[in-house]
Image (tube, helix red, strand yellow):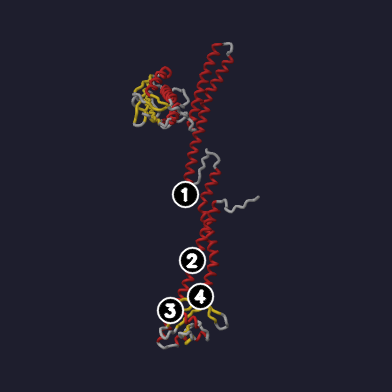
Amino acid sequence: MTVVRLVPSSLRARLALTFGAGTSFVLLVALSLLFVALDRQLDAAVDADISGRADDLIAGVLARDPGAVRGDPMAELYAADGTPLVSAAALAGQTLLAPEQVRAVGDRTVRSVVLLVPRPGGTPERVRLIARPVGRDGEILAVGQPLSTVEGAGDRQLVVLAVATPLLIAALCVLGWLLVRAALRPVDELTREAAAISTLDSDRRLPAVTGDDEIARLAATLDGMLARLAVAFARERAFVDDASHELRTPIAIMRGEIDLALQACDDPEEVRRSLSAAQRQAARLSRLAEDMLLLARERAGALGVLREPVDLTDLAHAEARALGPVTGITVEVRGDPVIIDADAGRIRQVLANLAANSAAAGAGTARVTVGTDGADACIEWADDGPGFPPNLLDQAFERFVRGDPSRTAPTGAGLGLSIVRAVVTAHDGTALLRNGPPLSGAVVTVRLPATF
């Protein structure tokens, strides 16, 4: 069954239809009011003409000049009983008012009365007249004006309006269509260009729309969104490329060590060395997979933290004792007890990654300072290493970013500081990097919301 749509699906057609209907209604109302105003103006002009003639004729009658009434196009003087005394020559024996109508006038003025007056030939004619008392002996003067001329003018106006109205409505509808099409032309261009952009790695962008209207701002917003998506896509692609590169190296080493073990089955010592090397690479792969999974959860907003009261100073002392032998650096802890609601395991991971980063940079000493700053708890990690390369200070938190190989040990995947920022962000905190005092090396400042 075919369903007929009463409302068009196209926005352009709907806007043009709404514009045409609205303007047609307004135009019809305006022209109707114009016709009524013109009709009333004609009636007012007729009344003014009759009133002026009546004033002149009354003056003539009072001056004993009945010829003024005979010379008028349509006037008649009556006695108080309704008998015609003087009639206009143009009436040709016809009367404007019947005797009872004259007697009904009395001493008052009757204005703008429309009557059907019989004319020669038996055809009645619509006449607008005024009946006034003359001021002597109860005489009544009636002055009339045929309405055929006025009605003809009104009919001609109605015909003109009836012909002009559809033409004006059609012109307004066409104008509305052209205006809507011109206004939505940039939208069509944006739609075609957006459909032509197949992937986010394309350099194509949406066309710029001149002006500062809503469509121009929409085009600029969409183009900015595409640019941001392209940057995010490039970062994700770089992440995949870097991850593939990082995974390829330990996998290749593992395969080589396993091949060596298989070839040296008759040499237990060689087999043990090969399997030990493969085990180390497997552990490296496991750490890399866990780090990548943590970052993926953080990107998806699913990195959960178990919040419980934690004394940051006690935790830092415990980690310093555990990290020193593993990393080969001396870790000093300073500060008073600071208790916050945090995930102790994740905070240990932050300290472990910072220690690994300092060890990889060749530092021998690290200092952890725990304190407070306003409503935040602060953990400052400083080492005596070479510090962050100046060109990497703004990128050190990015994934797979590593310093100059001549300044750092060729270990790690470049995810340590990314994990630090991810964990701190999950705790609604911030992390900042700099070089300098207190040990003239790298300094990482972690700020976490406090509960004291």
- Most foreground residue, 26 or 413: 26
Query: Rounded to the nearest whole Å, what is the CA distance between mark 4 and mark 2?
Result: 18 Å
Which amino acid is tagged 4? Val
- Most foreground residue, 1 or 27: 1
Q: Specify which label sits upstream in the sequence, 3 or 2.
A: 2
| Residue behind mark 4 | 150
Element at badge 2?
helix
| Residue behind mark 1 | 214
Q: Tell me, yes or no, if residue 191 can be seen here.
A: yes
Element at badge 1?
helix
Which amino acid is tagged 2? Leu
Q: Specify which label sits upstream in the sequence, 4 or 3.
A: 3
Element at badge 4?
helix
- How crowded pointer 3 is (Cα within 10 Å; few <14, some 14-19, many 20+) is rated as few
- How crowded pointer 2 is (Cα within 10 Å; few <14, some 14-19, many 20+) is rated as few
Q: Nearer the viewer, mark 4 or mark 1?
A: 4
| Residue behind mark 3 | 108
At a point 46% along the width and 72% down the height, the residue shown is: 41
Q: Specify which label sits upstream in the sequence, 3 or 1.
A: 3
